[in-house]
Image (cartoon, rainbow, N blue to C red):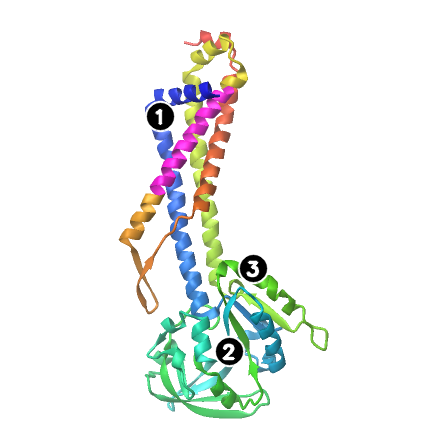
Amino acid sequence: MKNIIKMSLRNLLRSGRRTALTASLITIGVVFVLVYAALSGSFKAYMVGQITDSMLGHVQIHKKGYVASIDSLPLDKNLNQKQIEKITEFLDDNPYIESYTFRLKLGAMFSNYIASTSVRLNGINPKKETQTLPLFASRIDGSDPSSLKEGSIIVPELLAKGMNIKKDDTIVLVATNQKGSVNGLNFKVAGTSETVSGPGGRDGYIHINDVKKLLRIKQVEVSEVVVRLKDVDQLYKAMQLLKPLTLLKNEKDKPLFEIHTWEKLSPFYNIVKMLDIMDISIKIILISIVLISILNVMVMSVYERIKEIGTIAAMGTTPSTISKLFLTEGLMLGIFGTILGAMLSYVIVFVINTIGITFSFGRQDNLTLNPVLNFNEVLVVSIIVIIISLIASISPARKASKLNPVDALRQN
């Protein structure tokens, strides 16, 4: 085997220009895939963090049927005190959960005494909301949401602009409770909330106690439970421990609760899936580059070395040894291109992080994209390239091994 490796290396060095060109094509393909994977992975991680840490949380728990009718914000599908206590038991016993908060949602009429419109509102516990959603404060302009007081409201940005509403203005909210009773309360504008794509992106926020006053609710009632995990990568393990909640039945023998991950609630998850498909597409392009490059150089090598192949075959070299010789050459090309490509990728990612790619997202300026090249990604791409290099060498190797020594030596 050592002799085969030595001979393969010597043959590759003998055609140095062609070997260098082929290896450089493989290297470029590997660099392109790995750098793209690092950048897209960083973008996905950032966007998922923005959505889950500023609005949705990692998991949401509702009464069965609430999400299907969430656009109408149904008050008859709120969770009662007994159901909340049952959910809390599961959440407190789940080691993957860091924190959770309750929301009481409703639709109301919003008026600045000049014009009126409808608005979606979230009644929140300010401290728990900001603890469960650490980036929630970054969406709010003019106020610290953790200190939102009763009688204050955070107005959706689009609504505030459309009705020319400013901080400290007084507005009135009018809402109808489940029994049809209408009530109105005055609120002071504490700030505005930035629009975010997805459920809850255009909602206003008031204290949860204000919602109870507005709807004249005496008993404990919430619309949804928002859950934050210690590590989002443990999402499905946490869901397994919460699964028994979905098996609980009501008196009509129907499920009591439904649990949704952020992936089910956010339209951005479809973008994540598209990015994953693009990752696969780029890997396919890489495979094509490697396959064509290796196949081309090995076929040319066979045609240029027909007399040499005939000579070593006439000297008693077995067809299997000749086949191994060409397979080893292809494998060495793949390994060399992969190693060089991986090294260059790490250098490029380091340079990108040193220079810094800055961008803006909503009210957040000078955000920096920090690509990270995961070892697992490098390993997967390397294995793919090496395997394809070996596969591309099979056909030329078989052709070389089947050459008749007499016919090969007659070639000019």
Residue located beneath label 2 in the image: 103
Residue reaching furthest left? 355
Marks 1 and 3, the one that precedes in the sequence? 1
Q: Amino acid at mark 2?
A: Arg
- How many marks are shown on the rendered structure? 3
Residue located beneath label 1 in the image: 18
Residue located beneath label 3 in the image: 236
Which residue sits at x=47%, y=73%?
200
Depicted 337 relative to depicted 249: above or below: above
Q: Are marks 2 and 3 in contact (CB under 8 Å)?
A: no
Q: Amino acid at mark 1?
A: Arg
Which residue sits at x=44%, y=9%?
411
Element on which disc 2 rests: strand
Q: CA distance from mark 1 to mark 3?
A: 49 Å
Q: CA distance from mark 2 to mark 1?
A: 66 Å
Horizontal and vertical percent position of residue 95: 55, 65
Element on which disc 1 rests: helix
Q: Is residue 118 magenta?
A: no
Q: CA distance from mark 2 to mark 3?
A: 23 Å
What is the quadrant of the C terminus in the image? top left
Q: Amino acid at mark 3?
A: Tyr
- Residue 201 visible to the viewer: no
Towards the viewer: 407 or 25: 25
28 relative to 291 in the view: left or right = left
Depicted 377 relative to depicted 159: above or below: above
Horizontal and vertical percent position of residue 191: 35, 80
79 relative to 52 in the view: left or right = right
**Crowding near pointer 1: few (<14 within 10 Å), some, many (20+)?**
some
Towards the viewer: 111 or 31: 31
Question: Start and end of the magenta stretch?
Answer: 323-345
Which residue sits at x=50%, y=58%?
233
Marks 2 and 1, the one that precedes in the sequence? 1
